[in-house]
Amino acid sequence: MPADVMKSLFINPPSFEGFDGGAGSRYQARREVRSFWYPTWLAQAAAMVPDSKLIDAPPNDLTVDQIAPLAKDYELIVLHTSAPSFSNDAKFAARLKAENPNVTIGMVGAYVGVRPVPSMTSATAVDWMAVGEFDFTCLDVAARKPLRDVLGIAYRENGSIAFTAPRPKLENFDELPSVLPVYRRDLNIETYFNGYLDHPYVSLYTGRGCRSKCTFCLWPQTIGGHLYRVRSVESVEAEMTMAKRLFPEVREFFFDDDTLTDNLPRVEEIAKVMGRLGLTWSCNAKAIVPRKTLEVLKENGLRLLLVGYESGNQQILNNIKKGVRLDIARRFSRDARELGIKIHGTFIVGLPGETPETLKETIRFACEVEPETIQVSLAAPYPGTELHRQALENGWLQMETGELVDQHGVQNAMLNYPGLTSTMIYKSLDEFYRAFYFRPRKMFSLFSGMLRDPRVMRRRLREGGEFFRFLGERKKKDKAKLAAAAAG
């Protein structure tokens, strides 16, 4: 550990109201229900630098005017950015530089990692941007290493943009310090919540990367890679023992690895660790986990799986290289339901091959597999993904330079296909939610859960209000689009 480091501040910048801007999130937009994820990627970098500070602005409703004056007190500021938030984050960086012209500003995140030159050109106040994994990059910069000697960055040199040699991917994840002390020191865990995890919760990673090749998924194609690199089970046990001590009030721990179940023997060992510690937990999973493994997980504290079903049409799943068969997904869902494992199912409308018929097929499939809750997203062609490349090559983009989200942080429908316009895709989102949730069976299930637990009652009432307001905003947006089209 270097003896002399810059006084360093790590910031997930202010953004749209209710917008979890991607620091630890795959869904970089406002959600139907106000939700916030932990800034785990940024917290990991902050954990590398002694005496650093982490500020997560969105869940704390912190404004630019509240944070910017702090720049006077620091030598290094690192901002996490994303495709939807980049333009705002670039303006925020300029404000920080105006407050302290001598501060060194870096940007990290998938967007600047795949588009460093246009990003550096646009964000003139930023001194360097990480290209690839940035944990040790931030430490090197904080340790006052000359930028030209820091691996894996774009930086400014004599008025031009220069690059250093690529940084090798981290192989031994046991080298990384835990993010938990940073959470305890700098974050208020009460401000982090979503519609399917018990509150309060804590999320963290036990590894990075995903073996799946899904064409739309951002992190494996940009920073994480397709090799699942992990902490040892012994390291996970030590970290979760620490978690139990630091966060006795937490009701659920969420392992946010892209797919924790990619390694079945390892996830079973982690489950047994959680069982010994008496902790309730959840994780991301593909809809292919065998019943034998599900039984081990359930017996050792697993409460919920977040499952990316994406579509109920096999050809679309093949198009996006999902690596899942619908018959296996149906069996997996049935096994989980019989074992009492909750599922939060995620679906995407507007993927390549989508038609009005496949949209209906996916809605029917969602009602058949019957997850406890769902999230429906619009297909988002993030720069750096195969989906973005396909959209450019095939002319699917609604607007090549358009925004992934609108001025309020709500997703825009960015893709058009023959026979399926972006307007039709956008409208299907509302139809999907109504078809799934407004069934007597699902409404009875949700109300029963509310009656059994007062905490669930309060939460569902709040979420219901937010959900209907969100749908109302979408309806207004649809009317405004139609009016603009008629006027044009």
Image (cartoon, rainbow, N blue to C red):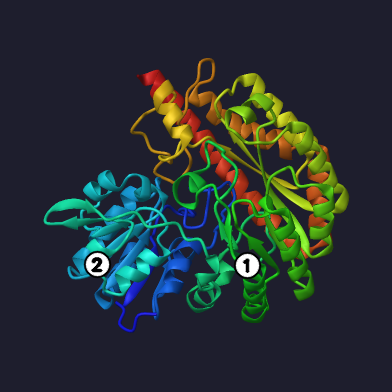
**Looking at the image, is 282 positioned above or below residue 392?**
below
Mark 2: amino acid: Thr
Residue type of the residue flagged with mark 1:
Ser
Graded by Cα atoms within 10 Å as few (under 14), some (14 to 19) or many (20 or more), the crowding at tag 2 reads many
Rendered residue at 49%/37% (across/down): 380
Residue 354, quarter of picture: top right
Between 64 and 29, the one lying in front of the other is 29
Give the residue displayed 34% in from the left and 65% down from the top.
78
Residue 218, position as x, y percentages in the image: 49, 44
Q: How many marks?
A: 2
Seen in the picture, residue 378 relative to 465 is either above or below; the reply is above
Write down the residue under mark 2.
104
**Whether residue 18 is visible:** yes
Distance of mark 1 from mark 2, alpha carbons?
35 Å
| Residue 149 position (above or below residue 209) | below
Rendering coords of residue 373 (x, y %) = 71, 47
Q: Is residue 14 left or right of residue 129?
A: right
Answer whether residue 412 is visible to the viewer in this image. Answer: no
Task: Between residue 120 and residue 412, name the one nearer to us.
Answer: 120
Query: Which is nearer the eye, 164 or 93?
Result: 164
Image mark for residue 232:
1
- Estimate how packed mark 1 is, as few (under 14), some (14 to 19) or many (20 or more) residues with alpha carbons within 10 Å: some
> How far across and down, in percent of the image, does residue 76 sit?
29, 71
Residue found at x 71% / y 69% = 251
Q: Quadrant of the N terminus?
A: bottom left
Please tell me whether mark 1 sits on a helix, a strand or a loop: loop
> Which element carries disc 2, helix, strand or loop?
strand
